[in-house]
Image: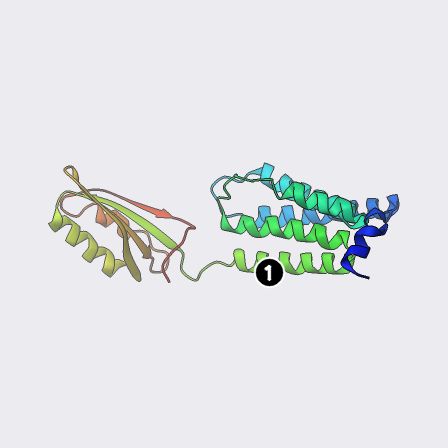
Amino acid sequence: MSFNDIFNSNFLENVTSVSLIDTAIALILAFGIGVFVYLVHKKTYKGVMYSSGFGVTLIALCMITTFVMLAITSNVVLSLGMVGALSIVRFRTAVKEPLDIAFVFWSIAAGIVLSAGMIPLAILGSVLIGVILLVFVNRKPSEMPYIIVVNCSDREAEAEVKKYIATSVTKSIIKNKTVSKEGIELNIEVRLKNDDTDFINNVVELKNVNHAVLVSYNGEFMN
């Protein structure tokens, strides 16, 4: 069959019907996998404030993708029109957490696989992805990172602070330094010795040190 024969025939008008039972099963499975994706996302979220709306969106994405793909596979003309319609859509919402992108693609991919009738692949793939994310995202480093914020008056005090902190922790690195007429502020990332935080009490006792704060965080840290 040539390219022209395709358009001269009823090929583009053929419609493959999708039964209500198949549609219901696909959407129910999409909902179940979407809920699983939502629970894994909630369990592995490391941001400051969790957005329940984003979690619900993951469920909706899986179900929406499923019934859209079911419609596309039923008719060639509809699939071409759907591609054209989706090509003009622009999403400008910024994704704050890089891992959220993986969850979005996971929901979409699960919907596509379900609509193709590959139910075992959709279920086993989602379970495997969920287990991998739970293991690696929730894996705690051997030494938790901390940030020390110290405000001192002059360079001599700065040198004393850096020297004392270097001898009180296992590892330290200056992440930020701010100099103003009021003094010098240091942000130092450290790894504690045996989770001992008592040394921070002595930092503020150093000469010309105004205050010192020790904060734990879950951001990017040194190796």
Q: Give the class, few, some or many, for how many residues have Cα within 10 Å of label 1's Cα (few <14, many ≥20).
A: few
Considering the numbered disc 1 on the image, is that residue within a helix, a strand or a loop? Answer: helix
Please identify the quarter of the rendering in which residue 67 is found.
top right
Query: 192 or 82: nearer the eye?
Result: 82
Which quadrant is the C terminus positioned in?
bottom left
Please identify the quarter of the rendering in which residue 126 is found.
bottom right
x%, y% of residue 148?
A: 29, 49
Question: Which residue occupies 83% across, 51% down?
Answer: 8
Q: In this rendering, would 146 be left or right of 47?
A: left
Q: Evaluate whether residue 195 shows in this view.
A: yes
Q: Amino acid at mark 1?
A: Ile
Question: Which residue occupies 52% across, 39% down?
Answer: 92
Question: Which residue occupies 48% across, 44% down?
Answer: 96
Query: 163 or 45: nearer the eye?
Result: 45
x%, y% of residue 163?
A: 19, 57
Q: State the count of labels.
A: 1
Q: How is the image coloured?
A: rainbow
Which quadrant is the N terminus positioned in?
bottom right
Question: Which residue occupies 11% across, 50% down?
Answer: 156
Q: In this rendering, would 111 be left or right of 17?
A: left
Q: In this rendering, would 184 be left or right of 192?
A: left
Q: Which residue is under mark 1? A: 132
x%, y% of residue 85?
A: 66, 40
Q: Evaluate whether residue 138 shows in this view.
A: no
